[in-house]
Amino acid sequence: MATENSSIAPSAPRPVRIAPSILSADFAKLGEEIRAIDEAGADFVHVDVMDAHFVPNLTIGPPVIKALRPHTKKPFDVHLMIAPVDPYLQAFADAGADIITVHPEAGPHVHRTLQEIRRLGVKAGVSLNPGTPAKMLDYLMDMVDLILVMTVNPGFGGQSFIESQLMKIEAIRKRIDKEGLDIALEVDGGINTETARRAVDAGADVLVAGTATFTGGPTRYAENIRALRGD
């Protein structure tokens, strides 16, 4: 198990992309917030969708995503923490999602779910909770464009980074590289300038950051994003 002082061998340098989670944005002015992170250099807009059933929180649905879509051309990285997930894939694709990420536990047939996401013309992602092993990916690697490793238990922002997930990130990165796959490896949960570096050293190339991006207001967003990237 990784500890505070664990040494994770850095993998080959790769561009680090930042996906601010709008869960930490000012919901009274979401359109302005999205334009601000776009101008500040965000690569994706990360949208956390929660149903108060699969996770203990309730956030937003397709109508909000549709309303926000005109405010940026950056990809909408939509993380569905809902169950059952299959009945809502079409609605989120129609609303403007560019990437739809689902949990294996959110439906009976995750392979079929990923097939449906791709049929809708959207990139497909799969998310692993802290207690979900990397082995869950064994027969899904050819179906995904993105793998999201949760470094907190999903449901709320502002939680502390779970150290044991560094080893999972490293294992998945080795597998992606060994098989020569074009898959983004994303990490979400407790990301700040310190944990960002450790996640990247373990193999992550996309960092979801809510609090660490939106702290200080719009005049700080560019600085916050640069710091997360390590620029």
Image (cartoon, rainbow, N blue to C red):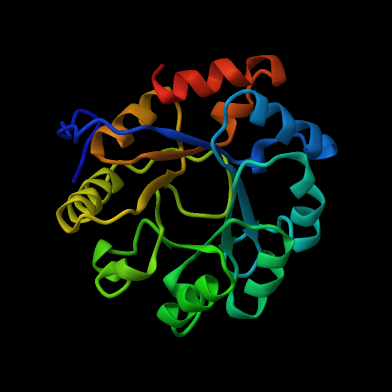
> Residue 125 location in percent, x, y?
45, 61
Q: Quadrant of residue 10?
A: top left
Quarter of the image with the C terminus in it: top left
> Residue 18 location in percent, x, y?
49, 34
Q: Quadrant of residue 23?
A: top right
150 relative position to 168: left or right: right
Name above or below for residue 228 compared with residue 22. Answer: above
152 relative position to 176: left or right: right
Q: Nearer the viewer, residue 204 or 216?
A: 204
Q: Is residue 51 visible?
A: no
Q: Is residue 178 visible?
A: yes
> Residue 29 location in percent, x, y?
83, 35
> Residue 174 location in percent, x, y?
17, 50
Name above or below for residue 199 compared with residue 52. Answer: above
Q: How many marks?
A: 0
Residue drawn where x is 32% and y is 36% of the image: 199
128 relative position to 37: left or right: left
Q: Nearer the viewer, residue 84 or 111?
A: 111
Name above or below for residue 74 compared with residue 103. Answer: above
Residue drawn where x is 15% and y is 31% of the image: 7
Q: Quadrant of residue 229?
A: top left
Residue drawn where x is 18% and y is 46% of the image: 1
